[in-house]
């Protein structure tokens, strides 16, 4: 069973930056695609970006150019660098495999973009 622990969220002003981290347990990390998701209040969870085991990436249009996903297979870590944050980026952010393993969702990390 793969488990994920997200961290790095917080309160930031519009235009600011945050770097989210995700620690993964389990031996399959280096052979699966990983992704970041988010869920805003009253909305469905959405896929933001994914990164393959070889480092190829893809980002949702609404965050492309502002968010960057990366991974370190030696540390079983996935990261999301978020720049030029907007109030509409306020959500709980999760990492998981792509496609997601339903039994592996972590607690997420809250990101709030506000003045």
Image (cartoon, helix red, strand yellow):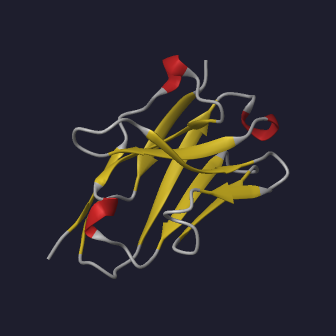
Question: Please, which residue is most extreme toward the left here?
Answer: 115
Query: Is 109 placed left or right of 69 in the picture?
Result: left
For the N terminus, the quadrant is top right
Q: Quadrant of the C terminus?
A: bottom left
Q: Residue at x 18, y 70 (%)?
A: 114
Instruction: Find residue 30 and report its horizontal and vertical position in percent.
Output: 78, 40
Asked where in the image residue 42 lies, by quadrant, the reply is: top left
Instruction: Write down the quadrant of residue 101 in the picture.
Output: top right
Name the one closer to the observer, 40 or 72. 40
**Apparent side of residue 112 relative to residue 25 in the rendered image (left or right):** left
Residue nearer the viewer, 43 or 74: 43
Q: Nearer the viewer, residue 58 or 105?
A: 58
Give the residue displayed 59% in from the left and 29% down from the top. Answer: 100
Residue placed at 74% from the left, 28% from the top?
A: 27
Q: How many marks?
A: 0
> Is 60 rendered above or below residue 99?
below
User: Residue 108 at what x, y percent from top left?
Assistant: 37, 41
In the displayed structure, does residue 46 sit left or right of residue 24?
left
């Amino acid at each position: 069973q793969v488990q994920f622990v997200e961290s790095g969220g917080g309160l930031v002003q519009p235009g600011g930056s945050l770097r989210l981290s995700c620690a993964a347990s389990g031996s399959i990390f280096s052979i699966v695609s990983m992704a970041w998701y988010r869920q805003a209040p009253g909305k469905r969870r959405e896929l933001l970006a994914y990164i393959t085991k070889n480092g190829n990436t893809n980002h949702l249009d609404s965050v492309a150019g502002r968010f960057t996903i990366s991974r370190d297979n030696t540390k079983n870590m996935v990261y999301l660098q978020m720049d030029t944050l907007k109030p509409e980026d306020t959500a709980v952010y999760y990492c998981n495999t792509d496609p997601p393993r339903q039994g592996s969702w972590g607690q997420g990390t809250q990101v709030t973009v506000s003045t």
